[in-house]
Image (cartoon, grey):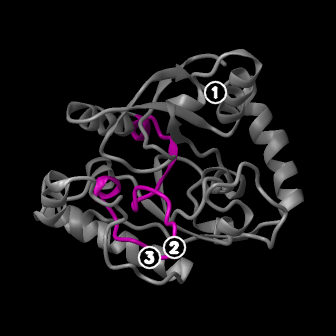
């Protein structure tokens, strides 16, 4: 792969406050093979139902904000999209050695992924800054406002990172509803299964500028709620009414989760 590009991401392709991005090669032969050979084969094999492709801008920066049911979501979205979509994946998928490490690395590059390292504090701000650069370059990117996969199939409250990027860059947000991906590759499965067809629904672009400035917490929260309402309308999931967070491990974490704060 050639040229240079940088991007941000979470423990899964999506939205997180604890990640920082590595500099990685840009589009090259591996990605071309993935886009023009592997993706058509996958579409032929799984025959996904794709709705709303006409809502997808053919050029310019765009943020895809999707529900998150399965590890395979970040491969289904680029497969269904009418133009290349980039996402971030944890760096361990790219760090392996030997043939297995090479195969994992090339597979994720072929899917349009870039590696991100886990971090905290300043790393979270750096990740947002790098993602802004990615949008400024006119890329289309996929993010998960819930932050991580839903293990019970419900739709959780959105974190505000996606809204922050949209308000800061002016990029439109395309809400995405995925249906059936958890049946193809449930949590814990190592390989996708040939199961019922998945449905990918691209909603109409959302212009969130009416909410206000990215510096306003009220604006970020309002924009996030609008995004999640659009995703809910597309996916039809039951609403969880809470954030998708791991159970607190100690008293300090329980206090932190109880205190009012903005989940980014």
Look at 31% across and 65% down and name the residue there: 208
Q: Residues within 10 Å of mark 1 (few under 14, many from 20)?
A: some
Mark 2 = which residue? 152
Q: Which residue is mark 1?
A: 27
As rendered, which of 264 and 150 lies closer to the eye?
Answer: 150
Q: SS class of the residue under badge 1?
A: loop
Side of 68 relative to 111 (left or right): left
Residue under numbered circle 3: 230
Whether residues under marks 3 and 2 lie with C-beta atoms below 8 angstroms apart, the answer is no
Question: How far is disc 1 from disc 3 in space, using C-alphas?
Answer: 31 Å
Task: Locate residue 30: give its quadrant.
Answer: top right
Q: Helix, strand, or loop for circle 3?
A: helix
Task: Using a 10 Å C-alpha cutoff, classify the residue at mark 3 as few (fewer than 14 neighbours), some (14 to 19) or many (20 or more).
Answer: many
Residue 178 located left or right of residue 146: right
Answer above or below: position of 91 versus 207. above
In depth, the one of 240 and 25 nearer the eye is: 240
The disc, 2 or 1, on the residue closer to the chain's N-terminal end is: 1
State whether residue 214 appears in this view: no
Q: What segment is highlighted magenta in the picture?
A: 134-163
Q: Residue at x 30, y 45 (%)?
A: 17
Above or below, 38 relative to 214: above
Q: Quadrant of residue 56?
A: bottom right
Which quadrant of the figure contains the N terminus? top right
Q: Position of residue 263 (x, y in %)?
A: 24, 58
Q: Nearer the viewer, mark 2 or mark 1?
A: 2
Going from N to C along the chain, the mark reached first, 3 or 2, is: 2
């Amino acid at each position: 792969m050639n040229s240079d590009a940088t991007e941000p991401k979470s423990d899964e392709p999506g939205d997180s406050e604890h990640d920082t991005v590595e500099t990685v090669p840009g589009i090259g032969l591996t990605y071309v093979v993935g886009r023009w050979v592997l993706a058509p084969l996958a579409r032929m094999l799984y025959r996904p139902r794709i709705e709303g492709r006409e809502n997808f801008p053919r050029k310019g920066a765009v943020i895809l904000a999707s529900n998150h049911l399965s590890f395979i979501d970040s491969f289904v979205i680029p497969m269904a999209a009418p133009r290349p979509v980039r996402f971030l994946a944890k760096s361990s998928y790219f760090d392996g050695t030997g043939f297995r490490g090479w195969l994992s690395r090339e597979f994720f590059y072929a899917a349009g992924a870039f590696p991100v390292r886990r971090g905290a504090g300043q790393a979270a701000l750096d990740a947002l800054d790098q993602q802004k650069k990615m949008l400024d370059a006119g890329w289309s990117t996929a993010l998960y406002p819930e932050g991580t996969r839903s293990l019970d199939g419900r739709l959780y409250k959105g974190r505000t990172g996606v809204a922050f990027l949209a308000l800061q860059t002016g990029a439109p947000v395309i809400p995405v509803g995925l249906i059936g991906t958890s049946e193809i590759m449930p949590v814990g499965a190592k390989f996708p299964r040939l199961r019922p067809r998945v449905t990918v629904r691209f909603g109409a672009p959302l212009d969130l500028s009416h909410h206000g400035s990215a510096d306003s917490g009220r604006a970020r929260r309002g924009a996030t709620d609008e995004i999640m309402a659009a995703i809910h309308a597309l996916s039809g999931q039951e609403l969880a009414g809470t954030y998708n967070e791991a159970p607190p491990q100690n008293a300090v974490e329980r206090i932190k989760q109880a205190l009012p704060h903005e989940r980014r």
